[in-house]
Image (spheres, rainbow, N blue to C red):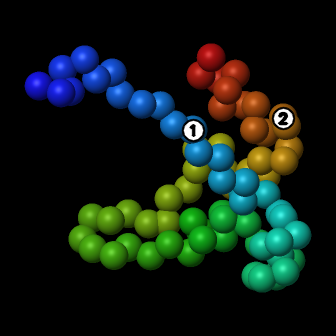
């Protein structure tokens, strides 16, 4: 079997839109972040609970104190 010794792959994805950004503000208006999409999510089927509210609230990832909280909380 070709996959016998396959150990998997690790990938990190950084999507820098959880804070106000000039590019997105030019398209969607002042103060737009991806959180706006999360806040307005609608259930699409039975038992689909939306919108989800983040455990630490809708934070600005450019705030180093806020973004370090999950790292130090879990580390």
Cα–Cα gap, marks 1 and 2: 22 Å
Res 53 label:
none
- Say which residue appears at 47% left-offset and 31% top-offset: 10
Q: Is residue 29 left or right of residue 50?
A: right
Mark toward the start of the polypeptide (1 vs 2) = 1
Residue 60 x %, y %: 79, 52
Residue 20 x %, y %: 83, 63
Q: Give the residue pinned by disc 2.
A: 65
Q: Quadrant of the C terminus?
A: top right
Res 12 label:
1
Front residue of this view, candidates 49 and 24: 24
Residue 50 x %, y %: 44, 66
Marks 1, 2: nearer the viewer? 1
Q: Quadrant of the N terminus?
A: top left
- Say which residue appears at 86% left-offset and 44% top-offset: 63
Which structural element holds mark 2?
A: helix
């Amino acid at each position: 079997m070709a996959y016998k010794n396959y150990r998997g792959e690790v990938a990190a994805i950084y999507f820098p839109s959880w804070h106000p950004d000039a590019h997105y503000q030019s398209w969607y208006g002042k103060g737009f972040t991806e959180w706006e999409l999360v806040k307005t999510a609608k259930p699409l089927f039975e038992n689909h609970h939306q919108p989800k509210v983040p455990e630490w609230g809708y934070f600005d990832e450019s705030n180093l104190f806020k973004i370090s909280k999950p790292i130090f909380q879990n580390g």
